[in-house]
Image (cartoon, helix red, strand yellow):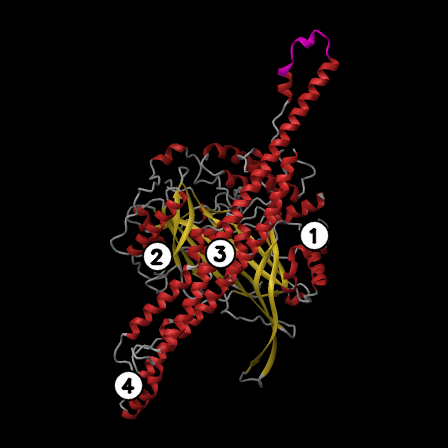
C-alpha cells in the first residue's frame, strides 16, 4: 500500500504550468483533422463541446481524480482522396464519436487497489448503457500525460469485459501556475490496444466554425440581358411568398423556433431536477450529521459510565467524596474527525483514498473547517478553491478591505459614455515569449524532494491564512488545496512586461 | 501597489457556461459578463455569467455596449432578488480560440477602462482549440487578470489574479438560462444580418435566393452545431439527475432507518 501511495505521490508531485510556453503548441487543425498513422486504418475522434465542458464541470466539483465512461459510436468511413500524384485511393477511417459521458460518483467504484475490475459493480454502474461504451476517461491533477500502470491494467480488463477491441482512454490533466492565476486542462485520447506508434488520436471538438456572414451578397452581378432578368424573375418567383420574403426563410425559422422551444422545455425540466437533487442531497447530509452527532453522544455517555464504574471499583471511600468530575472532563476529548497524518512526516503515508474518504465525510457533514481540512493533500498544486497565500494576499489585514469599494446592491455600474474601441491592432500583450508550458520532465525529480518542505511551509501558511480570511466560505476551505508556492519564487515576478 | 482584488472564485456552474460558450466556435472570440459579488476579503465571487452578442466581430474588438451593460445590471438585480444577496456585474470574460490565453494590448486597455468605473472589475480569458501536433495533446486554458498602470501616462500592464473554480454540485437556474440563450443569440445575429441585406432593394431574384439560402444554411449550422448538442446534453443531464435522485432517495431512507435505530 505504501509503495502504491509513494508511486502516486511521485506521479502527482509536480506538473506545474509554467510560461513561456513550448513552441510545440500550435493552432488546432480545422475540425475534422485526421492524423496520419502508420496503421492501415486512420482514426478520427470527436467530442461535443457540451460533453467536454460537462467533464470539466464534474472534475471541478471533485476534490480528487475523477473518472467515468465514454458513451458513443465507432463507425467506419471511407474517404476517397484524389491527388495529382496518385490515382484516387480509398482510405478506411475509423471515426470515434463521443456522445456523452457517464461520470463515476467516486474512485474505485468498479475496481480495487490492485486494479482488478469487478464486473458486477461495472454492470450496476453502467446498466443498459453498457452497450454504448466506447471508452473511459480519467481526470487527474498535475500528472504526466501517460497512462499509469493501474490504468493500463483496468483498460485491458475493460476491453475484455465490454468486448470493445479498440476501447479508447481519454486522459485529462490539470495544471496551474504557482499563483493560480492561470490554469490549463490538457487532454489526450489514447487507444492503448494499438501498437505503440499510433496510441494517440487527435480529438476534435466540432463547433460552429465558419458560418461566415460574409457569404451574403450585397450586390448582384451586373447584367444587361433582358432575357436573363425576365427568366429569373418569372421562375424565381416560386421561391418567394406574397410578401416578397423567401419561403425557405420562414420554414427554416420555424424549424429553429420549434427546436428552441424544445430546448427551453427540457431546460426547465433539468432545472427542476437540479433543485430536487439539491434538496435530497441536503437532507442526506443533515441525516448524516445527525447520525454522527447521535453516535458521538452515545459514545461519550458510554465512556462516562465506564469511567464512573472504574472510579467506583478502584477508589477508596475517602476519594469517593469528590466526584472527580474535573478528571472526567479532562479525559473527555472532543470527537473531531481525526486529522489525516501528513504524508511528509509519517513513515507510511495513508493511502490516497483514505484521505479522500475522510475529506468526503468532512464535506458531507459541512462542519466548519477543522485543521484537517486545511492540510495539504498529496496533489498539492492546481487546486480549485483555495486562494493562494501569494504576494497579493500577504500582509493585508481586514482593515484594507474597508476602503476599497465593497460592493452593495446599491452600487451602480455606470455605463461608459462611449464603448471603448481599441486600435484593433490585435497585437499580443507579450513582448516576451508566451507559449504553452512544455513537458516538465526535468522538474519532476527536483520537485520530489521539494515537496515535503513545501508541504510543511504551506501548512503553516494555511493555518495563519485562516485567521486572515474568515470570509472564505467553509466549503471552499474544506475542499481547497493550497497552490504550491513555486520553489523559484513568485511566478508573477517573472512575468512582468 | 495593492490590487483591489485578491482572488476570484468562479462557481463551477458558471465555469460550465463559460466553457460551453468558448467551445461553441473556433472562428471568432466570444464574450460575456460575470455576475456576482465582492466579499469583504476582496475575493470576487462569480455566481453566473451572461452571454453577450458581439456587435463588432472584427478580431480583437471585444467591447461591451452601454445597452449590454444595462441589461446585465438588470440580470444582476434579478439574481440578487433570487438569492437575497447583493449581486452586480463584477467582470467580463472572452475567448481566445487558437490564440494564447494572455490578454492582448487591447484587452488590457479595455480592462483598464472598466477598472476606472469599478476597481474590482476582473477579466477572464478562455483559450481553446489549441493542440500540440507532436503529442496530440489538446489544451484549454483560462486566466484571470486586471490592469495596472506602472506610472501615470505609461502603457497599461496585465496583473495576474488568482482564480479558483468553486465546486457546485447542482447547476443553478441562472446558469441554465444563460446556457440556453446561446442558440437564440446566434439566431438573432443571423436575422439582423439578413434583414440588412434583404432591405437592399436592387438585388435581382437570383441574388436574393442566394442570400436566403445563406441564411438557411447558417441557421442549419447553428442547429446542428449548437442547438442539437445542447439539447442532447440537457437530456443526458436530466437522465443523470433522475438516476441520482433515485439513489439519493434510497440513501435517505436508509439513513432515516439508521437514525431511528439509534
Secondary structure of the residue carrying tag 4 is loop
Q: Which residues are magenta?
A: A315-326
Indicate whether A51 appears above or below A231.
above
Look at discs 3 and 1 and give the one toward the viewer.
3
Task: Say if mark 4 contacts mark 3, CB within 8 Å.
Answer: no
The answer for how far apart the CA atoms under marks 4 and 3 are is 54 Å
Residue A162 occupies quadrant: bottom right
Q: Which residue is mark 2?
A: B106
Residue A269 magenta-highlighted: no
Q: In the rendered structure, which disc, 3 or 1, sits on the residue that comes first in sequence? A: 1
**Measured from the top left, where is residue A449 in percent x and y?**
62, 42
Residue A324 magenta-highlighted: yes
The one nearer the camera, A26 or B260, is B260
Q: Is residue A341 visible?
A: no
Secondary structure of the residue carrying tag 2 is helix
The answer for how far apart the CA atoms under marks 3 and 1 are is 34 Å
A476 sits left or right of B159 in the view: right
Mark 1 belongs to chain: A
Indicate whether B250 appears above or below A423.
above
Look at discs 1 and 4 and give the one toward the viewer.
1
Sort mark 1 into few (<14), some (14-19) or many (20+) by Cα contacts within 10 Å.
some
Q: Which mark is residue A269?
A: 3
Quadrant placement of the C terminus of chain B: top right
Sort mark 4 into few (<14), some (14-19) or many (20+) by Cα contacts within 10 Å.
few
Amino acid at each position: 500500500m505504501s509503495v502504491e501511495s509513494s508511486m502516486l505521490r511521485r506521479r502527482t508531485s509536480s506538473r506545474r504550468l509554467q510560461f513561456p510556453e513550448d513552441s510545440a503548441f500550435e493552432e488546432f487543425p480545422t475540425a475534422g483533422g485526421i492524423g496520419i498513422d502508420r496503421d492501415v486504418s486512420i482514426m478520427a475522434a470527436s467530442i461535443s463541446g457540451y460533453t467536454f465542458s460537462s467533464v470539466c464541470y464534474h472534475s471541478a466539483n471533485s476534490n480528487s481524480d475523477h473518472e467515468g465512461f465514454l458513451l458513443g459510436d465507432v463507425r467506419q468511413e471511407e474517404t476517397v482522396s484524389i491527388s495529382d500524384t496518385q490515382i484516387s485511393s480509398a482510405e478506411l477511417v475509423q471515426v470515434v464519436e463521443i456522445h456523452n459521458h457517464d461520470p463515476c460518483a467516486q474512485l474505485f467504484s468498479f475496481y480495487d487497489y490492485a486494479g482488478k475490475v469487478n464486473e458486477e459493480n461495472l454492470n450496476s454502474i453502467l446498466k443498459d448503457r453498457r452497450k454504448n461504451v466506447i471508452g473511459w476517461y480519467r481526470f487527474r491533477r498535475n500528472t504526466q500525460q501517460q497512462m499509469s500502470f493501474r490504468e493500463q491494467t483496468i483498460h485491458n480488463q475493460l476491453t475484455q469485459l465490454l468486448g470493445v477491441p479498440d476501447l479508447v482512454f481519454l486522459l485529462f490533466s490539470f495544471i496551474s501556475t504557482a499563483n493560480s492565476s492561470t490554469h490549463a486542462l490538457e487532454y489526450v485520447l489514447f487507444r492503448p490496444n494499438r501498437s505503440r506508434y499510433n496510441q494517440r488520436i487527435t480529438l476534435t471538438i466540432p463547433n460552429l466554425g465558419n458560418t461566415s456572414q460574409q457569404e451574403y451578397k450585397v450586390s448582384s452581378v451586373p447584367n444587361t440581358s433582358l432575357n436573363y432578368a425576365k427568366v429569373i424573375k418569372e421562375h424565381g418567383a416560386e421561391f418567394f411568398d406574397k410578401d416578397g420574403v423567401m419561403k425557405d426563410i420562414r420554414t427554416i425559422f420555424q424549424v429553429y423556433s420549434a427546436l428552441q422551444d424544445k430546448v427551453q422545455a427540457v431546460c426547465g425540466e433539468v432545472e427542476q431536477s437540479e433543485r430536487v437533487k439539491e434538496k435530497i442531497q441536503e437532507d442526506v447530509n443533515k441525516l448524516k450529521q445527525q447520525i454522527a452527532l447521535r453516535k458521538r453522544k452515545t459514545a461519550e455517555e458510554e465512556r462516562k459510565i465506564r469511567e464512573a464504574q472504574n472510579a467506583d471499583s478502584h477508589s477508596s471511600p475517602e476519594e469517593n467524596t469528590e466526584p472527580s468530575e474535573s478528571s472526567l472532563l479532562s479525559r473527555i476529548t472532543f470527537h473531531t474527525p481525526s486529522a489525516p497524518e501528513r504524508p511528509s512526516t509519517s513513515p507510511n503515508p495513508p493511502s490516497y483514498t483514505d484521505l479522500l474518504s475522510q475529506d468526503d465525510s468532512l464535506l458531507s457533514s459541512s462542519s466548519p473547517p477543522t485543521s484537517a481540512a486545511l492540510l495539504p493533500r498529496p496533489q498539492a498544486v492546481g487546486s480549485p478553491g483555495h486562494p493562494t497565500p501569494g504576494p497579493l494576499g500577504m500582509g493585508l489585514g481586514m482593515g484594507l478591505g474597508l476602503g476599497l469599494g465593497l460592493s452593495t446592491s446599491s452600487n451602480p455600474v455606470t455605463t461608459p459614455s462611449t464603448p471603448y474601441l481599441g486600435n484593433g491592432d490585435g497585437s499580443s500583450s507579450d513582448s516576451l515569449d508566451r507559449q504553452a508550458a512544455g513537458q516538465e520532465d526535468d522538474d519532476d525529480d527536483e520537485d520530489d524532494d521539494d515537496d515535503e518542505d513545501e508541504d510543511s511551509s504551506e501548512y503553516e501558511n494555511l493555518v495563519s491564512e485562516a485567521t486572515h480570511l474568515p470570509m472564505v466560505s467553509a466549503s471552499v476551505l474544506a475542499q481547497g488545496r493550497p497552490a504550491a508556492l513555486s520553489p523559484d519564487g513568485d511566478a508573477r515576478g517573472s512575468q512582468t512586461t | 501597489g495593492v490590487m483591489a482584488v485578491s482572488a476570484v472564485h468562479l462557481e463551477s456552474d458558471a465555469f460550465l457556461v463559460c466553457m460551453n460558450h468558448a467551445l461553441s466556435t473556433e472562428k471568432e472570440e466570444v464574450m460575456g459578463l460575470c455576475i456576482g459579488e465582492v466579499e469583504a476579503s476582496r475575493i470576487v465571487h462569480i455566481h453566473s455569467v451572461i452571454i453577450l452578442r458581439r456587435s463588432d466581430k472584427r478580431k480583437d474588438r471585444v467591447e461591451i455596449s452601454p445597452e449590454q451593460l444595462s441589461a446585465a445590471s438588470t440580470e444582476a438585480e434579478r439574481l440578487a432578488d433570487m438569492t437575497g444577496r447583493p449581486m452586480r456585474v463584477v467582470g467580463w470574460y472572452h475567448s481566445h480560440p487558437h490564440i494564447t490565453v494572455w490578454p492582448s494590448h487591447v484587452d488590457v486597455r479595455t480592462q483598464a477602462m472598466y477598472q476606472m468605473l469599478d476597481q474590482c472589475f476582473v477579466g477572464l480569458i478562455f483559450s481553446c482549440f489549441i493542440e500540440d501536433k507532436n503529442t496530440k495533446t489538446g489544451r484549454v486554458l483560462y486566466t484571470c487578470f486586471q490592469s495596472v498602470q506602472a506610472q501615470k501616462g505609461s502603457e497599461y500592464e496585465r496583473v495576474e489574479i488568482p482564480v479558483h473554480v468553486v465546486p457546485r454540485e447542482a447547476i443553478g437556474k441562472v446558469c441554465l438560462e444563460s446556457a440556453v440563450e446561446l442558440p437564440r443569440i446566434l439566431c438573432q445575429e443571423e436575422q439582423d444580418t439578413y434583414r440588412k441585406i434583404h432591405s437592399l432593394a436592387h438585388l435581382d431574384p437570383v441574388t436574393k435566393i442566394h442570400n436566403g439560402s445563406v441564411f438557411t444554411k447558417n441557421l442549419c449550422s447553428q442547429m446542428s452545431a449548437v442547438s442539437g448538442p445542447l439539447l442532447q446534453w440537457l437530456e443526458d443531464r436530466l437522465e443523470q439527475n433522475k438516476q441520482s435522485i433515485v439513489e439519493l432517495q434510497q440513501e435517505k431512507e436508509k439513513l432515516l432507518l439508521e437514525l431511528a435505530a439509534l
